[in-house]
Amino acid sequence: KQEVTQIPAALSVPEGENLVLNCSFTDSAIYNLQWFRQDPGKGLTSLLLIQSSQREQTSGRLNASLDKSSGRSTLYIAASQPGDSATYLCAVKGGQGGSEKLVFGKGTKLTVNP
Amino acid sequence: DGGITQSPKYLFRKEGQNVTLSCEQNLNHDAMYWYRQDPGQGLRLIYYSQIVNDFQKGDIAEGYSVSREKKESFPLTVTSAQKNPTAFYLCASSSWGGVAETQYFGPGTRLLVL
């Protein structure tokens, strides 16, 4: 059964700092890995999707990498801003048996202090 | 505007009562999903539907029921058999299949027990 773990559970940084969020998964036979952002009491917004054949994706100040063989992904946020404060969720699609379902981690709650 | 709508934003349930959460999408997506989120937890899949008039149980389907009579709509009923219904419920939709398809999420419904 696919399991997704995110470390740390919470992170507090001063504005302007570069930071890394970590995600690991137990079954490397995935179709893709996605990073989502969730603001308090809101739905999820897709940030980046990395297909299993790709190594990384970039969008603005965000860069996500994927090492499928080791079962790890990182989300790098450059020059953090208070508006980046949110919970970041990692999710993988696929695994043994070819499931179309997404399996989510519990998230990392990020606070960027002005 | 294209997107997913959920209603109501807040819902209160009395003991022994069934309640229905609404989810509508105008993205022309074939697949729709219901997730439950508890504080500090990732999302857990309740039910999903790949196509009209067909749906599958997710990881925590007990105490819930769904229908998919129209492509645009996927209502979730929380029955009296669900003993711990207090949670944040999220609906999502996507195109089915493919390694580059992401899920789009609604704003969520918070269910509270009186």
Image (cartoon, coloured by chain):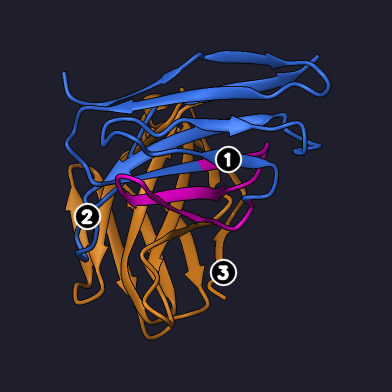
Chain colours: A orange, B blue
Does residue A12 appear in the picture of this structure? no
x and y percentages locating residue A32 in the rendered image: 30, 66
Q: Name the residue under label 1.
A: B65
Please tell me the numbered disc located at residue A4. none
The image quadrant that residue B85 belongs to is top right
Q: Nearer the viewer, residue A53 or B109?
A: B109
Q: Do labels 2 and 1 share a chain?
A: yes
- Marks 2 & 3 on one chain: no
Magenta highlight: main SS = strand
Identify residue type, mark 3: Glu
Q: Which badge, 2 or 1, comes first in the chain's sequence?
A: 1
Report the residue marked by disc 3: A3
**Over which residues does the magenta segment extend?**
B35-60
**Host chain of mark 2:** B
Specify the subunit that label 1 lies on.
B
Q: In this view, does A73 lie above or below B113?
A: below
Q: Residue at x 42, y 81 (%)?
A: A97
Q: Position of residue A14 (x, y in %)?
A: 48, 34
Name the disc covering residue B101, or none.
2
Q: Residue at x 23, y 62 (%)?
A: B97
Marks 2/1: CA–CA distance: 26 Å
**Relative to the observer, which residue lies in front, B65 or A102?**
B65
Amino acid type of the residue that numbered disc 2 sits on in the rendered structure: Glu
Residue A90 horizontal/vertical position (percent): 44, 55
SS for tag 3?
A: loop
Seen in the picture, residue A113 relative to A104 is either above or below; the reply is: above
